[in-house]
Amino acid sequence: MRVILPDAPMHGERSGNESETEQAIYFWDTVRGNIDELPLLRDALDAEG
């Protein structure tokens, strides 16, 4: 089993100077971004074997 825990946009290594309010406003956009990125991450890991 492999567990993948990427940083979400506006979090961790991918954060900028967003305030907590800005992060809250864009919460669902962030969730959707994670969903959209999942196939890209999976394909990259599959390519590495």
Image: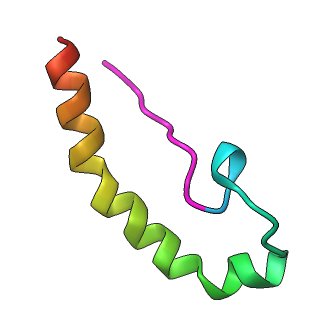
Residue 42 vertical placement versus 15 (above, below): above
Q: Is residue 4 magenta?
A: yes
Q: Residue furthest front?
A: 16
Q: Residue furthest bottom?
A: 25
The N terminus lies in quadrant = top left
Q: Quadrant of residue 37?
A: bottom left
Query: Measured from the top left, where is residue 27 in percent x and y?
Result: 58, 78
Q: Residue at x 65, y 62 (%)?
A: 10
Residue 22 appears left or right of 38: right
Residue 15 vertical placement versus 3 (above, below): below
Stretch of the chain drawn in magenta: 1-9
Query: Measured from the top left, where is residue 28 in percent x and y?
Result: 50, 80
Query: Measured from the top left, where is residue 39 in percent x and y?
Result: 21, 47
Near-viewer residue (48 or 34): 48
Residue 44 appears left or right of 34: left
Q: Is residue 3 magenta?
A: yes
The C terminus lies in quadrant = top left
Q: Residue furthest top?
A: 49
Residue 12 vertical placement versus 31 (above, below): above
Residue 19 vertical placement versus 36 (above, below): below
Query: Measured from the top left, where is residue 29 in percent x and y?
Result: 48, 78
- Main SS category, magenta section: loop
Q: Residue at x 82, y 75 (%)?
A: 20
Q: Residue at x 59, y 82 (%)?
A: 26
Q: Residue at x 29, y 62 (%)?
A: 36
Residue 16 appears left or right of 27: right
User: What colour scheme has been applied to the protein in the rendered image?
Assistant: rainbow
Q: Quadrant of residue 34?
A: bottom left
Residue 12 appears left or right of 21: left
